Image (cartoon, helix red, strand yellow):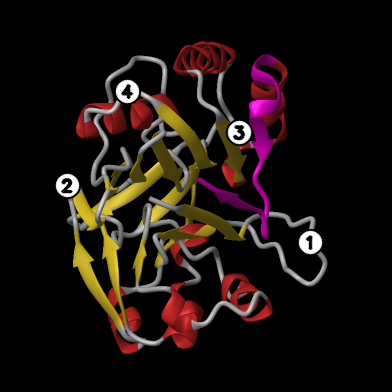
Amino acid sequence: MKVEVTILIENSTPIPGLVGEYGLGMLVRVDDRGILFDTGMADGLRRNLETMRIPPPAIEMIAISHGHFDHAGGLMSTLDYLGPRDVYIHRNAPLPKYVLTGDQKTFIGMPQIEELAKKGARLVYNDGPIELLPGVILSGSIPRTNDFEDTGGNFGVVRDGKMEADNFDDDQALFIKHPEGLIIISGCAHAGMINTIEYARTLTGIDRVKAWIGGTHLINASPERMRNTINRLRAYDIDIIAVTHCTGFFGAAQIYAELGTRVSKGECGMGYTF
């Protein structure tokens, strides 16, 4: 099994000619079959696809990690470039989502499904795990099995006309069963980085974690959460930890200080081959 992960859009890029944009989107190629995991916020991903000369046939399908604008907002322009595609998404991802600050609420949800359908999105709802390609599993809802990880902020969702705390049952990741161990591709990990890793190991029956690539939502993590996360990551002995987007500078710096050169900041244009 050959796996190639290319970060197509992220907050920043070190590569001239590419554009950075708040959000995340990655091309995951497994034995030359492509899955687009998340689409960024607006049109940056499409622009980078064109700049990198990645043709539409290279991407068979799209999977969305959760229903926030910075991961699904780019669906509209991406579909303009790719044409009609199956879009795998949790059933609750399209619900209206907000960040709550005091009495203020700010909409941070994804495009409406009716508008996506007009662009050629064929929505496929997966509330539980589904195998997208041989050895590649889209997780569905991730169980919460520890007492130190939270969703990473004060988020709300509207269900049946009422605002309630968003527990991100729509948060999901890609689990790739590589011969050298699991490769975990994460959007924001609102379910928690460690919860996500533990579910990947339980679901697949594979203990060894080869790589983590993606968001961690440690940007607002408490000292206790950071300490517990780093201790668990050290125990897993992961070869590559490429943190992106919502990890934050201080979160990334703390993980790097403790775990060394296995940790890197994943940015737009970077690629990983296994």
- At label 2, the amino acid type is Gly
Observer-nearest residue: 132 or 31? 31
Dot 2 crowding, Cα within 10 Å, few <14, some 14–19, many 20+: some
Q: Which residue is mark 1?
A: 15
Q: Which residue is mark 4?
A: 207
Is 273 on the left or on the right of 162, as rendered? right
Q: Determine if the magenta segment contains residue 232.
A: no
Q: Nearer the viewer, mark 2 or mark 1?
A: 1
Pointer 2 or 4: first along the chain: 2
Pointer 3 or 2: first along the chain: 2
Q: Which residues are magenta?
A: 258-274
Tell me the distance, in whole angstroms, between the alpha carbons under discs 4 and 3.
Answer: 27 Å
Q: Nearer the viewer, mark 2 or mark 4?
A: 4
Observer-nearest residue: 33 or 90? 33
Label drawn at residue 128: 2
Is 257 on the left or on the right of 72, as rendered? right
- For the point 31% across and 38% down, the residue is 167
Q: Which residue is mark 3?
A: 219
